[in-house]
Structure formats: structure tokens, C-alpha cells
Image (cartoon, helix red, strand yellow):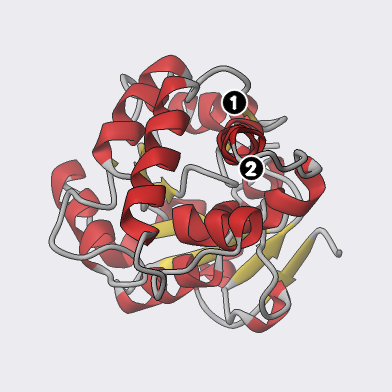
Amino acid sequence: MPQATMNLGISQKWQDSPTAVQAFLFDLDGTLADSAPDLAGAANEMRLSRGLEALPLAVLRPMVGAGARGMLDVALQITPADSDFEAVKAEFLDRYEARISQETRLFDQVLELLDALQKAGTPWGIVTNKAERFALPLTRHLGLHGAAFAVIGGDTTAHAKPHPAPLLEAAKRGGVDPQRCVYVGDDERDIVAGRAAGMGTVAAGWGYLGNGKPIESWNADIVLSSPVGILKLLGLA
């Protein structure tokens, strides 16, 4: 993947004037944090309890962005159409909550990125589809909660991504203009939400990406292969 693929949009503003960007918003799973080992661990615990062999992380990792629904589809071939889906989903979430920070770590270069943004006086926040039940303790464990101007979960507003409401709520809490924000995420729905909110968008090529359309087709302003690519676009690296 090239270091940066640019479309017309806020990417040109970054080159012309880094101050055009007032704030950054980030997805959590697959963008800031590599939570796949704990999510996959919860899924494999369920398989083992049912007499099934554990699946390789490489099989489960791409589905992290699809949440519990995607993980259970791959791990146990169960979907919302099944009568016991909600009970199985509740078991998965309870198992995940019990090990939420056991193996989850920040991706390489994320701390470098966030520290540089802070030193440059550029505020940042987090918008995730993870329910607050999980998002708040995990961001505290990772040392992100106090530095972020907002942590918005999938149940903070009436709608989750790809609806723009969570992103707009984050901008409101930060007192920033949505049109001067950039949203960074590793799933197509992140880009859809960012564009719907009037924000610039970055597709995080280092993330999970799922098994859907190629990242280059998501219509993001920029596709980057590493977190520090953002700093290079801002002239901070």
C-alpha cells in the first residue's frame, strides 16, 4: 500500500495549511488499539466451552470491526436470525468484558502520534461503536481517557456509526467545528460517518479493514499505512 493516497478534499488543506485542521477524532478498535487478541480470546473461550478447537487469530482478526455479530458469525456460525443469538451475544460480551485489557495494546506509533498532536496544540478525541460499558474502562487502561477531549461510545447517542451523530457529539463536546475535524478509522463505515458529518477522513490502512471492499474504494480523503503518516501530512514529522 502506498504511504498516502490523496483525493481532492481536506488532504490539500493539510498540505497548504496544517492549521486548517482544528481537531482529530479516532476510532478505537483497529485504529488506536489492537484489541483483536482479547476479542478473539473471548470467542475462542466460547468455542472451547462447546468442545470446538480454537481458531487462529488471523481468522478472527479481520472481523473485529464488525463487532460481536461478526465475531460470532465466524466463531460459531450464529447470526441474528438464530433464536438464541441474543443469549450467545450476551455470553460473548461478558467473556470479553472479563478479559478486556488482558492482551489489548496500542498500535505501534500511536503514542508518538498522539503526543505530537498534543504538543502541537491539536486536540483529539475518540469515537467508537464499542458500548460505553467497554469503551470507557478500556481507554482508561490504555491511558487515553484523560487526554482525549471526548470518548464517545456506540450507545452515547441515539445512533452508532455509520450515522454521523456520534462524531457530531464529539465535536460538540470539544467545542470544535465539524468541518475542521478529521476522522480516522479502519472500517468503511468510519469513512461514511465522517463524510456525513462534514469532516475530513483518513482510512487507517494499519487496522483490521474487514473482508469487504478494498480500502482504496472507501472514498476517504486519504489512505495511510501508518499512524505517523498523519504527522507527515501536518508537517510535524
* Left or right: 39, with 148 as reference point: right
Q: Is residue 99 above or below residue 77?
A: above
Q: Residue at x 36, y 71 (%)?
A: 162
What amino acid is at disc 2? Leu
Tell which of 181 and 82 is nearer to you: 82
Report which quarter residue 70 is drawn in. Answer: bottom right
Report the residue that reaches farthest toward the right. 1
Q: Which residue is mark 1?
A: 104
Q: Secondary structure at mark 1?
A: loop
Q: Residue at x 32, y 56 (%)?
A: 86
Q: Is residue 72 left or right of residue 48?
A: left
At horizontal 37% and vertical 32% (from top left) the residue drawn is 94
Q: CA distance from mark 1 to mark 2?
A: 24 Å
Pinpoint residue 28: horizontal percent, then vertical percent.
47, 42
User: Is residue 90 found left or right of 210 in the rendered image?
Assistant: left
Q: Residues within 10 Å of mark 1 (few under 14, many from 20)?
A: some
Nearer to us: label 1 or label 2 = 1
In this view of the protein, can residue 144 be seen by the observer? Answer: no
Query: How many numbered badges does the structure rendering display?
Result: 2
* Residue at left offset 52%, top offset 30%: 114
